Amino acid sequence: MRRWHQVLGPGLLFAAAAVGVSHLVQSTRAGAQYGLGLVGLIILANAVKYPAFRFGPHYAAATGVSLLDGYRRQGRWALVLYAVLTVGTMFTVQAAVTFVTAALAIATLGLTVSPIVVSVLLLAVCGLLLAVGNYRWLERVTKVLVGVLTIATVAATLAALPRVDFSTARAVPISGFWDATTVAFVAALVGWMPSAIDVAVWQSLWTIERQGQRPPSMRLRETMLDFHVGYIGTALLAVCFVIMGAGVMHGSGARFSPSAGGFAAQVIGLYTQTLGGWARPVIGVSAFFVMFSTTLTVADGFPRALAALVARFRGPEQVGDPGSGRAGYLVSMAVLMFGSVVVIAALLRSLKLLVDVATTLSFMTAPILAWMNHRAITGDEVPADGRPARWLRVMSACAIGVLSAFAVAYVVVRYG
């Protein structure tokens, strides 16, 4: 157990960042609306994005520098592009995960406080934890949260399993896949399934934070073990949430509330009604821990990446030191949290709109970031013995093509 505790770190942080809105909201909605009809698509999304996510920690372990330095080597344009994509999505992403977390806290505890007030309090708690404890506290808190949410989610899934209509399962996505409504939902679902690809940059930075704790000969192997535990676990939990939505909400005739509080109360209420009163604390705790872990990791990931990004504009990265600085990290965090509160206030009454905007932006930017990650891991700075195998490079190239085709198809169906 001590050995596993030492190995696991950034992979669990990835799981915490991923298992949030994409699972609790989008995967549950997928199961509720389509039964098991979109399970195949969810599995495909996890498989297609696998190379792009893997290359983040892989690059850091092989070179000793973060993925942002790999972008810098491709040209200043790559850093500018990443900056535009990050600034264009970070406020909406942080707002979405914080908003849902606040709504769950209100629904679970029966509070009468405004979601904005609870959101501000949650962000303050996250900011305090990160400002005082930095990466060490982030990792320790996240390990506990991921453990609790995994146990609670598996328990709820097993309880809902007997109620699932397995006739809805499809190897190919549901019929009517190309109608505009379903395409819009699928774009939002796939956009954060398992997460937005820019999280690969966060993983590379988290990996640099932990590399000093491992022998050099073990870094790449242990980093990949850590990554696979987090990535595979995240994919399995996505299927769990689809099963829960299919077993409890599919065919119930319930209409989804567009507000965060209404949706949260609806999910908890339906589970309690279907599975019994015992399920309320299990579902409530599971849902809240899912979202709080996501809120915490996102509150660290964006500022960490922004501070390191500014440093990369100034020059190359030193091995083992992104050079972001404590002040830059804290200022970036303050800007992120202030902008997120503004977004929450502007879109207070529409959870669906807030989530769909954030996830669709991630969906459209996925092929660009996947291409940049592929170029980084195949760069000359990566040692020969640290480069990915040929099959993985081929898989990455094919995945970029698939993600690009998805993005083009979405634009054509949605706007053409």
Image (spheres, rainbow, N blue to C red):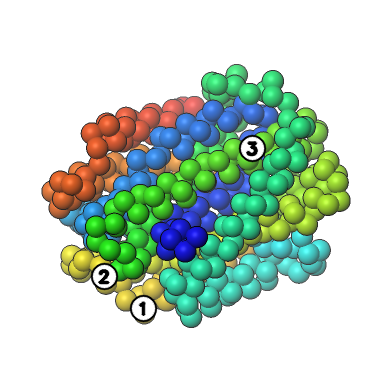
Horizontal and vertical percent position of residue 209: 35, 67
Q: Label 2 belongs to which residue?
A: 321
**Disc 3 packing (10 Å; few <14; some 14–19; many ≥20):** many
- The tag earlier along the polypeptide, 1 or 2, is 2
Q: Nearer the viewer, mark 3 or mark 1?
A: 3
Q: Label 1 belongs to which residue?
A: 326
The residue that appears at 32% across and 76% down in the rendered structure is 325
Tally of marks: 3
**Disc 2 packing (10 Å; few <14; some 14–19; many ≥20):** some
Circle 1 sits in a helix, a strand or a loop, which is it? helix
**Relative to residue 221, is residue 35 drawn left or right?**
right
In this view, 337 is above or below 225: below
The residue that appears at 35% across and 49% down in the rendered structure is 224
Q: Label 3 belongs to which residue?
A: 242
Disc 2 from disc 3: Cα separation: 40 Å
Circle 1: residue type: Arg
Circle 2 sits in a helix, a strand or a loop, which is it? loop
The residue that appears at 23% across and 34% down in the rendered structure is 390
Circle 2: residue type: Asp
